[in-house]
Image: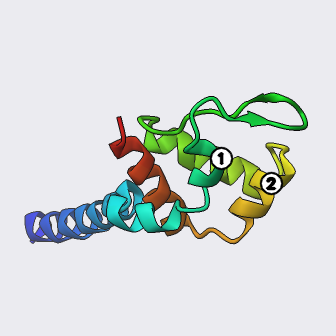
Amino acid sequence: MRLFLRTILFIIVFGLFASSVSIAAGNAEQGKIKAETCLGCHGIPNYKNVYPTYTVPRLGGQHADYIVAALKGYQSGERSHGTMQAQALGLSEEDMADIGSYFQSLQ
């Protein structure tokens, strides 16, 4: 009986873990659609932000986890950049994962 209960518990925990991993991985195809506004700055080679002046980072090829963490930082106010904070404000966790997956897929 204990083996049966352990097996059931394992299946439940593994199922929950597997479903959260698939969400965290994101959908690059959906991310391409959701990242369209990102490309207005991040898709232009050597594009410079006016104020403060700096070269806007290229996101293609970045790790999805980094992009998600950055977007969450802008959303929470931990990272300060008015435009990025406004862009991140309306994003869900799924949106961020999709966008991260899309940019990671670019080389």
Question: Residue at position x 62%, y 33% from top?
Answer: 57
Residue at x 75%, y 52% (from the top left corner): 84
SS at mark 2? helix
Taking the spot 13% from the left edge, 65% from the top edge, the residue there is 7
Circle 2 or circle 1, nearest the eye: 1
Q: Residue at x 44, y 46 (%)?
A: 103
User: In the rendered structure, which amino acid carries the disc numbered 2?
Assistant: Thr
Mark 2 = which residue? 83
- Asked if 90 appears above or below 77 in the picture, the reply is below
Q: Is residue 80 above or below residue 61?
A: below
Disc 1 element: helix
Q: CA distance from mark 2 to mark 1?
A: 11 Å
Give whichever of 19, 77 is nearer the camera.
Answer: 77
Question: Nearest the camera: 83 or 75?
Answer: 83
Per the image, the residue denoted by label 1 is 41
For the residues labelled 2 and 1, say whether their Cβ atoms are less than 8 Å apart: yes
Residue 104, numbered label: none
- The quadrant the N terminus occupies is bottom left
Lateral position of residue 10 relative to residue 25, left or right: left
Residue neighbourhood size for the residue with mark 1, other residues' Cα within 10 Å, grouped as few (<14), some (14–19), many (≥20): some
Res. 76 image quadrant: bottom right
